[in-house]
Each structure stands twice: as structure tokens, then as C-alpha cells.
Amino acid sequence: MQETQQLRIFKFGGASVKDAAAIRNLRQIAQTYGQPGPLLVVVSAMGKTTNALEELFQLAHSGQDYGPQLAVLRDFHLQVATELGVTDEAAGTPALTELLEQLQDRLATLQPGDFDKQYDQVVSYGELLATRIVARALQAQWLDCRPLIRTDHTWREGRVAWPATERLLGAVVPAQLAHGPVVTQGFLGGTSSGQTTTLGREGSDYTAAILAYCLGAESVTIWKDVAGLLNADPKIFADTVRFPEISYQETIEMAYYGASVIHPKTIKPLAVKHIPLRVKSFVDPAAEGTLIHDCRHGLLVPAFIRKTGQCLVSFESKDLTFISEENLEVIFGALAQARLKIHLMQNSAISFSVCTDFSAFRLDKLLALLRDQFTIHYNTGLELYTIKNYDAASIRRLTEGRELLLEQRTRQTFQFVCRGGPNEFVK
Ligand SMILES: Nc1ncnc2c1ncn2[C@@H]1O[C@H](COP(=O)(O)OP(=O)(O)O)[C@@H](O)[C@H]1O
Ligand SMILES: N[C@@H](CC(=O)OP(=O)(O)O)C(=O)O
């Protein structure tokens, strides 16, 4: 594989491309910090476009009128392109209007069934449209990553076929980078038969890591609306502290437990190749941010992580049989089939409980698979809190006055599930 010397990868998420002013700011950052090249820029859908596309898709798939929402989405992208003066369609292939027409066609020709597969074919247009605009604004080359980031057919959470992806990217991207900056889509991949897949919501950070791993990048910088990786989400918790540097191991755990600033899959490919990851503020790009790399540090301050939209499911054997390895095998198999990920689990003599993301569709599937064998109870509308590197004061801060439905602690991590409610303790 041909490695690109000193390649820097910049990733810009939805907030950093939410309108024309944000894209001008991105251009300034790329010009100031992305030189000398080579520079590969990964871009997500603009603002909340992915949510809007999800809604559009739901409407279209269920046969409802989606015309007004589609018009809003179309006008928004065209308006931003006009404000940036990048409506010169001849200069880009495919043109913005061509992508918008493709999206319209996709929506008009949806078939009943195949929900997840068709979701990917529609929702992917957020990144296609955004990169078309950003590439033109940067006068950079536009790269369609779908034929190069090869995944299996796991719709909505494509699993990367690493050897093929490394070969495909290596054959195309270094040559393109030799001609100047390249802009490509986050979140997207493609199957061997040429169908679009997505890598899981908020998966654009992961795309930056895939590209870095496969192309042997020097570093990855993800530009966010926060000062760096903090010990908690500042939208929820008061008095947050920035980590100037932190290890891959600490970061992967924070991301895994739900610190939404970095997609959890991002860290491993970078750690394997010792590629540093910087989290920097696009609001204050000169500020230090956070450097995530191979480093050792003492005990860090407690980090707080909240996951909302949780569901606690308890399985009880119907005949007072103990929860055994055989029972657990059946339960885990059903959870995997329903594609429900376990965030926390606990068992007693005759009962086994798991905390997972709530999805009515997936929960129904799980119930259908296990109802005959187990008595199943569940609660929805819950929150899962994790405190990494906890102490007594940090536990008190979060748990006081709350009814804990499930609680667990290891040497470094304290977790509990409780009902969602006002966050009287956080701000
Ligand atoms: N530990 C944390 N440190 C910093 N930001 C965090 C943390 N946990 C959650 N966040 C949230 O992550 C947001 C940035 O991530 P996200 O909105 O997904 O960015 P993007 O869309 O640009 O990829 C911040 O605005 C902040 O609210
Ligand atoms: N646009 C996709 C992928 C993504 O990563 O977006 P962002 O970088 O804005 O979190 C999503 O919203 O899920």
C-alpha cells in the first residue's frame, strides 16, 4: 500500500457545517491549520440534516406525504450553496441539483419492507450533499468514499472489510491528494455490490479513523463546538474540566459509556497505529484542545456520562429454574438477533436484567423471541449514568434524591440506572 507522508485528516461534524457562516469558518481553519498538505477533510451532514432525512424516510416508507419536508431540505442546501457562491454546477460532478434529484427519485421509489437497507440509501444523502458544497467552498476535490470504504451488508451499521478497504483507498486516495485537498463523506460505506451502507449514527468520527488507519495518516483532528474532551458534557453538567492529554484507553471507555463527543469505534484503529487524535474547537481553533495518544497519567478527575432513552429488561424463568449459562446463551442470542446492545447487566437467582437503548421495534422483536421461555418485565424512559474514576463525593452528587433501579461498581467505574427526570443536580 502506498502511504501518504504527513497526511492530516480533519473531520468536521454537523455543527461545524450547519450554515454558510460555519462553512466559511471551516474554510478558514483548513487554510490556517491544514497546510502544508496533504489534507483529507471528512464532513458530516449539515446541522441536523440526518435527523431530517430519517423523518423524511419514515414518512415516505409509510406512504405519507413527505413533499413539504423534502422542499425544506432542498431549499436549505441550495440556499447555503447560493450564499457561498458555489452554485456553478459545471465545476462539480455530480452537481448539487443532480444529488437532490437522486434523493427525490429514491424517496419516490421506496418499496415496502427492507427498512434498514432503504434507510441507508436515503439517509446517506446528507453527507453527499454537504460534501458537495464544502468541496466547492474549499475549491477541493470531491471524493465519493462509498466504493472505497467496503462494508458487509449490515445496514445502518456496516462492518468494515479492512483488507479490501485498505487496498481500495490506497489505490485511489494518495494519487488524488497529490493534486490538493480532498473532501469526502463521513458515516458512509458501500457493499461489494455497490449499495450504500451507513456506519451507525454519529459514525463520521469513525470514518476519519478508518481513513487514517488505511492511509497511514500522521494525525486526525476532529473539530467540535467544545474546547476538547471534557470530564462531562457541558450541555448537561456544570463545572466541566478539559483533559489537555489523555490515553486511548481512557478515551475509549468514556466513548463506550456514552460520551457522545467521540464515536466509540474511532479509537481502536488509531491506537493500533499510534496515530494521535486531537479534539479541537472550531469556535476557538487556536486553543490547545485535547491530545489523545499513547501516554501515561495518574488518576484523572471523575468523568460523568449520561445515556438517555434507556430501557431495563428483566427476564425471569417461568418455573423458578436458576438463571444458568444455558438460559443466558438463549437471552444473549436473542439480544444479538434483535440488535440490542447491552450497556449494563446483572443477575440474581431466577432473574437476569439488562439495560439497553430503547427501540420499540427491537424490543418487540426480543419479546417475540423470548416470551415463551421467560416472564419479561421492562421499564422505558430511563437514564444510565456512569462515573469513571469515581469518589464518594461524585457518587453523592449524582445519586442524591434519586431512586436507583440498578447499580453496579467496579474499581474505577460506578454505574446506575434511574428514571429520567429534571437534572436538578447538574447545572
Ligand atoms: N465528555 C465530553 N466532552 C466534550 N463534549 C462532550 C462530552 N460528552 C458529550 N459532549 C457533547 O458532544 C458535543 C460534540 O459532539 P457532536 O455534537 O456529536 O459533534 P459533531 O456533530 O460535530 O460530530 C458537544 O457539544 C457536547 O455537548
Ligand atoms: N450525520 C451522521 C453522521 C455523523 O457522525 O454526524 P456528526 O459528525 O454530526 O455527529 C449523524 O448525524 O449521525
Image: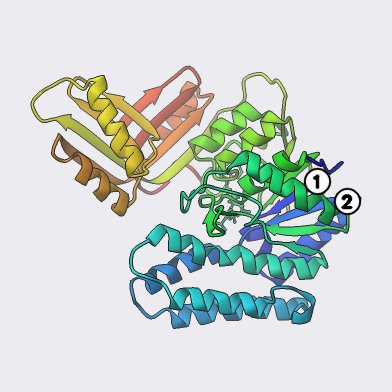
Secondary structure category for the residue under label 1: strand
- Disc assigned to residue 399: none
Frontmost residue, 243 versus 74: 74
Asked where in the image residue 244 lies, by quadrant, the reply is top right
- Name the quadrant where ligand 2 sits: bottom right
Asked where in the image residue 45 lies, by quadrant, the reply is bottom right
Question: Are the residues tagged 2 and 1 within 8 Å (C-beta)?
Answer: yes
Upstream in sequence: badge 2 or badge 1 = 1
**Residue sitting at x 88%, y 58%:** 179
Frontmost residue, 259 versus 11: 11
Percent from the top left, x then y, of residue 417? 35, 36
Frontmost residue, 46 versus 302: 46
Percent from the top left, x then y, of residue 318? 10, 30
Q: Is residue 284 visible?
A: no
Question: Can you identify the residue that label 2 sits on?
Answer: 37
How crowded pointer 1 is (Cα within 10 Å; few <14, some 14-19, many 20+) is rated as: many
**Residue sitting at x 44%, y 64%:** 118
Q: Amino acid at mark 1?
A: Arg
Q: Amino acid at mark 2?
A: Gly
Locate residue 243 relative to residue 107 in the image: left or right.
right
